[in-house]
Amino acid sequence: MDSIRNIISGKKGLIVGIANENSIAYGCASVLRELGAEVAVTYLNAKAEKYVRPLADKLEAPLVMPLDVEQPGQMQQVFSDIEQHWGKLDFVIHSIAFCPMDDLHGRVVDCSRDGFQQAMHVSCYSFVEMARHAEPLMKDGGSLITMSYYGADKVVENYNMMGPVKAALESVSRYMASELGPKGIRVHAVSPGPLKTRAASGIAHFDQLIDDAIARAPQNKLVDIEDVGMTCAFLISNAARSLTGQTIYVDGGHHIMA
C-alpha cells in the first residue's frame, strides 16, 4: 500500500456518485484519500446532501457540490468550481446510474422510450459529458473511470434494460480512450461483482444474484467497495500508464466462469 501511496499522493480528482457509506463511489474516495489523493465530491440533491456531507468531512473534501446530471448547468458549474479551486484535474470517477423502476423490472423489448433515454442519459451520456469538461483540466494527462457490470457482456436475469445501457457505457469508454489517448488521458470501465449498494437494491431478486455470484466465483466470495477502490487507485497511478480502454473486472473471477 505504501508503494501505491507514493504514486497517488497529491493527485486531485472528482468522485461522483456518493450516496452513503456503502456506495462504490465512497469506497473509492476513502481508499484514494487514505493514499494521499485530494477528492472533490458531489451530492444529488438537498435530500442527499445530509448523508453526503458527513462523509465529505471524513474525506476532508475541499469541494462538495450539487450535481444532478439531468439539471442543465450543474455539471458546468462543478467543473468551473474545480478549475477555480485547483486549476487542474488528475482523475474523475463516474459511479452513477439510473433506470425507472417499471423499465428496470420489465422486459427490454417492452421498455419505454422515455425510460430508455433517461437511463442512457444518466448512466452513459453523463460520462461523455464529464470527459468533455475534464479534458481541458487534465493538462498533464489523467484518468477517467466509470462503473459497469457483468450484465453489459452477458445476459443476467433481472438486470434487464441496464444491460444494454452498460454495454453502451463500456463502448463509449473504448472510443474515448482512443480519442483522448494522445493527450495522455486514459479511460477505463471497472466492472465490480454484485455489491449490496442502494442502487443495486432496485434489481429484482438481488439476493439470489448475490448467492449465485458467491457460488460461481472461483474465490467463492463477494468483493467489497475497498477492493474496487484499490483497483481504481492502481488505474489512476502512473503504474498503469500504459493501460487504457479496458473493462477491468473486480469480481473474484466470476466473469470467467461459463
Image (cartoon, helix red, strand yellow):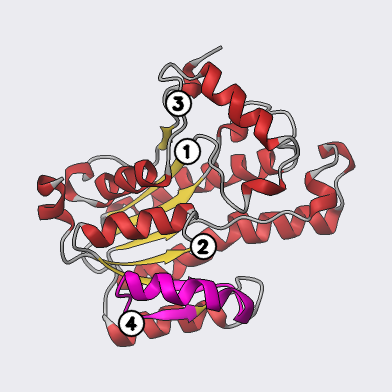
- Quadrant into which the N terminus falls: top left
- The reply to whether the magenta stretch includes residue 20 is no
Considering only vertical position in the picture, is 189 above or below 251? below
Q: Earlier in the sequence, mark 2 or mark 3?
A: 2
> Where residue 8 sits: x, y (%)?
18, 56
Asked whether residue 194 is in view, the answer is yes
Q: What residue type is labelled 3?
A: Lys
**Could you tell which of marks 1 and 3 lies nearer the N-terminus?**
1
**Separation of residues labelled 1 and 4 (CA atoms):** 31 Å
The circle drawn on residue 83 is: 4
Q: Residue 217 or 142: which is nearer the viewer?
A: 217
Q: Do the residues labelled 1 and 2 touch (CB within 8 Å)?
A: no
Q: Which residue lies furthest to the top in this view?
A: 258
Q: Which mark is residue 20?
A: 2
Amino acid type assigned to the residue bearing label 4 in the image: Glu
Residue 77 position, x and y percent, is 48, 84
Residue ID for mark 1: 192
Looking at marks 1 and 4 on the same chain, the residue that comes earlier in the sequence is marked by: 4
| Image location of residue 98, percent across then percent down | 67, 56
Residue 13 drawn above or below residue 218: below
Farthest residue to the right: give it.
Answer: 110
Whole-angstrom CA distance, mark 2 to mark 4, is 26 Å
Judging from the image, what secondary structure is the residue with disc 3 in?
loop
Q: SS at mark 4? A: helix
| Residue at which label 3 appears | 221
Q: Tell me which residue sits at (77%, 52%) in the image.
A: 116
Say left or right for 125 vs 243.
right
Q: What element carries label 2?
A: loop
Label 4 CA crowd tier, 10 Å (few <14, some 14–19, many 20+): some
Query: What's the amino acid at mark 2?
Result: Asn
In the image, 20: left or right of 121? Answer: left
